[in-house]
Amino acid sequence: MKMSKDQTGRRILGFAVVASILAAAGAAFAGTGQPTPWEVTLQGSASPVMDNIIWFHNFLFWLITAITIFVLILLIIVAVKFNAKANPVPSKTTHNTLIEVAWTIIPVLILVGIAVPSFRLLFQELDIPKADLTIKATGKQWYWTYAYPDNGKFEFDSLLVADKAPRLLGVDNEVVVPVNKVIRVQVTGADVIHAFAIPSFGIKIDAVPGRLNETWFKATKEGMFYGQCSELCGKDHAFMPIAIRVVNDQEFAAWVEAAKKKFASNPTNEFASIGSAAR
């Protein structure tokens, strides 16, 4: 059955609306803590910063969708009403003051509407509040070393364990932090540039040799959360995951006491960790 031009336009518009609704619905069911099969949205939030990142992402998504639909409608109207068959004698109109003012002012207002929440989000990410706990993360080829300067100054290496779930994200020594506490993360590199990234916490910062960068997060729920090095750092770039376990205050205190004993004999723990990974 042959469809009219109006029916075709309505069908295209309907497909666009359905696609946008499905994408937004997918965000509501996004997993938390680690990637999930067939996931096309952001990982679920577990921090205030990630809450705002998801809000800003959805805000931009709907704004871009509205602009795209509006432009599509204009294109369809132009194609239908102003083709050579419908207008054998073309209009000689060259200026329209109202339209010219509108297409200048409206984009400016749209950009201002994007800039305000964007700058607010950047400020939230970069303005580190008073920390309850400081962790130093050092990127190495190809694993992470973590230090707890506020809790006895012990440190340990964290290496990929190939047969540990989830695949390519499980490690031998996890970072442990308390829930609902501000965690300041000091990040540096020992050899080349790495990047410390945890999607569910909304953090990603370069680990640069000779430079100490800082970021922060406040985990709002307990559980395991995973990230990876997000800077191409060498042949084993894909095999230096980040695993953070969020626990309550009592469990964290118990873990700290156990960690002081476990890592006391060899503070850097490098050779022990490398041997463990080889096994």
Image: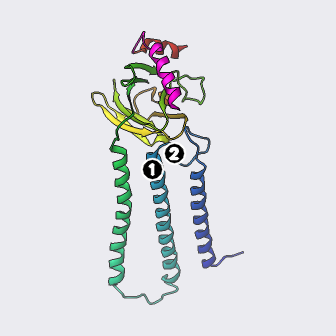
Nearer-N-terminus badge (1/2): 2
Asked if the residue at tag 2 contacts the one at tag 1, i.e. Cβ–Cβ closer than 8 Å, the answer is yes
Check the image and name the residue furthest to the bottom: 89
Q: Quadrant of the N terminus?
A: bottom right
Residue 274 is covered by the magenta coloring: no
| Front in this rendered view, residue 29 or 51 | 51
Check the image and name the residue furthest to the top: 265
Q: Is residue 80 above or below residue 235?
A: below
Residue 249 is covered by the magenta coloring: yes
Q: Amino acid at mark 2?
A: Ser
| Front in this rendered view, residue 6 or 40 | 40
Q: Is residue 31 visible?
A: yes
Between the C-alphas of marks 1 and 2, the distance is 9 Å
| Front in this rendered view, residue 39 or 80 | 39
Q: Is residue 149 left or right of residue 179?
A: left
Residue shown at 66% from the left, 76% from the top: 3
Circle 1 residue: 53
Circle 2 residue: 45
User: SS for tag 2?
Assistant: loop
Q: Which residues are magenta?
A: 246-267
Residue shown at 43% from the left, 14% from the top: 269
Residue shown at 44% from the left, 20% from the top: 157
Q: Amino acid at mark 1?
A: Ile
**Picture coordinates of residue 268 (x, y %)?**
39, 15
**Picture coordinates of residue 215 (x, y %)?**
36, 38
User: SS for tag 1?
Assistant: helix
Q: Is residue 246 left or right of residue 152?
A: right
Check the image and name the residue furthest to the front: 250
- Dominant SS in magenta: helix
